[in-house]
């Protein structure tokens, strides 16, 4: 694969005095000096013009079940053409994709390869995917690339999905909204201290994104990775579940098991009992759809009203759906999602 380094003029920034720029793509709101990069490492100020250094350079592309995102109420059983570039605006200590998320454009050893937005869409269609997912790293930081691809995908009849940390600004969400159909947002904690310490970000912008996506009718599901000793207290889990219930009790909550990784190898894996406890807390907060991730046997979708089996899943894949037109076939309850 050919090593590439492509730059493209950035969106969502403004010039400041002395050739500085203000990037308002994400909630870091970086003020970037000439010849410097933003926190994400892939947006660079060159003589007062902000460029993205990730445009057109794919570091990973795969055909995934949509359930892997995870999205369980969005086109279950379909496949999603999934792409990423290098870089991220977070520095999560537990990141499972840290080799590519924490890389810089100068790291040619990773072997990025060129794909135009047109080629991405063509590959998705060729492989009979129902959607394109911008995932693995943080799609916000390759926003221009995702935006151009998403526009073409919509024209070709494909859906678009962000798998995101939710740190985009309102301006970024407004810009992508006409082409963004669904998102899985990581709500990593309900503690601003946790976000600052573990992720090098803040909590409130993520909460704002979740609420805004719901308001804009983007289908949203939320994932929380439970890290023992960090965000697994009953209070913390209750705060997350309560917040989600105030946005919508129909938001699927994916409670995911942590395994030691990257800079957090001194922690143990999450006990299954902790995940089950979190699920019960979610139920007490009236959340209708709660799934356990990174463990088998907890991925089926059941009716919140009568408990009828609606979607049968094996690990990260839907085996059979009994749903028809958003309605439980047994009791007639409306099941929120995008099912066709």
Image: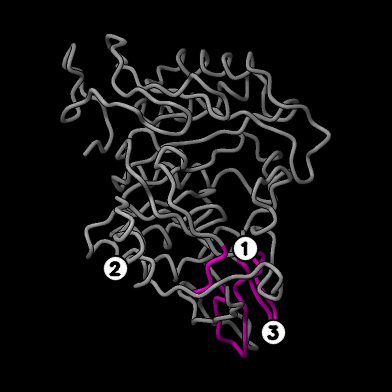
- Viewer-closest of 309 and 202: 309
Judge the density around disc 3: few (<14), some (14-19), many (≥20) Cα neighbours within 10 Å: some
**Circle 1 is placed at which residue position?**
87
* Residue drawn at point x = 42 percent, y = 65 percent: 146
Whether residue 228 is situated above or below residue 136 in the rendered picture: above
Magenta region: 30-59
User: How far from the left and from the top, in percent, is residue 292?
Assistant: 52, 24
Distance Cα–Cα, label 1 vs label 3: 18 Å
Distance Cα–Cα, label 1 vs label 2: 23 Å
**Circle 2 is placed at which residue position?**
152
Q: Does the CB distance between marks 1 and 2 fall below 8 Å?
A: no
Which of labels 3 and 2 is toward the front? 2
- Number of labels in the image equals 3
The image quadrant where one finds the C terminus is top left
**Circle 3 is placed at which residue position?**
35
* Residue drawn at point x = 71 percent, y = 40 percent: 193
First in sequence: mark 1 vs mark 2: 1
Distance Cα–Cα, label 3 vs label 2: 32 Å
- Image position of 142 (left or right of 148): right
């Amino acid at each position: 694969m050919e090593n590439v380094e492509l730059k493209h003029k950035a969106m969502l920034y403004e010039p400041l005095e002395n050739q500085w720029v203000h990037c308002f793509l994400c909630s870091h709101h970086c003020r970037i000096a000439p010849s410097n990069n933003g926190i994400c490492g892939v947006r660079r100020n060159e003589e007062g013009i902000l460029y993205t250094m990730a445009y057109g350079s794919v570091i990973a592309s795969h055909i995934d079940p949509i359930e892997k995102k995870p999205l369980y109420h969005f086109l279950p059983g379909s496949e999603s053409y999934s792409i990423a570039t290098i870089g991220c605006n977070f520095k999560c200590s537990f990141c499972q994709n840290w080799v590519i998320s924490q890389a810089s454009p100068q790291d040619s050893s990773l072997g990025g390869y060129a794909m135009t937005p047109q080629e991405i869409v063509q590959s998705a269609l060729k492989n009979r995917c129902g959607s394109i997912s911008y995932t693995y790293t943080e799609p916000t930081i390759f926003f221009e690339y995702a935006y151009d691809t998403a526009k073409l995908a919509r024209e070709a009849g494909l859906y678009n999905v962000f798998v995101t940390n939710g740190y985009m600004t309102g301006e970024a969400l407004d810009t992508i909204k006409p082409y963004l159909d669904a998102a899985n947002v990581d709500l990593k904690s309900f503690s601003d201290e946790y976000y600052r310490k573990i992720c090098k970000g803040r909590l409130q912008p993520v909460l704002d994104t979740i609420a805004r996506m719901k308001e804009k009718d983007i289908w949203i599901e939320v994932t929380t990775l439970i890290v023992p000793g960090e965000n697994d207290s009953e209070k913390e889990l209750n705060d997350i579940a309560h917040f989600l219930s105030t946005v919508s009790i129909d938001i699927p909550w994916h409670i995911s098991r942590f395994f030691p990784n990257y800079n957090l190898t001194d922690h143990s894996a999450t006990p299954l009992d902790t995940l089950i406890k979190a699920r019960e807390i979610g139920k007490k907060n009236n959340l209708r759809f709660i799934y356990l991730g990174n463990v088998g046997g907890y991925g089926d979708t059941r009716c919140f009203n009568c408990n009828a089996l609606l979607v049968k899943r094996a690990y990260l894949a839907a085996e059979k759906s009994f749903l028809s037109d958003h309605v439980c076939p047994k009791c007639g309850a409306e099941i929120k999602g995008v099912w066709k």
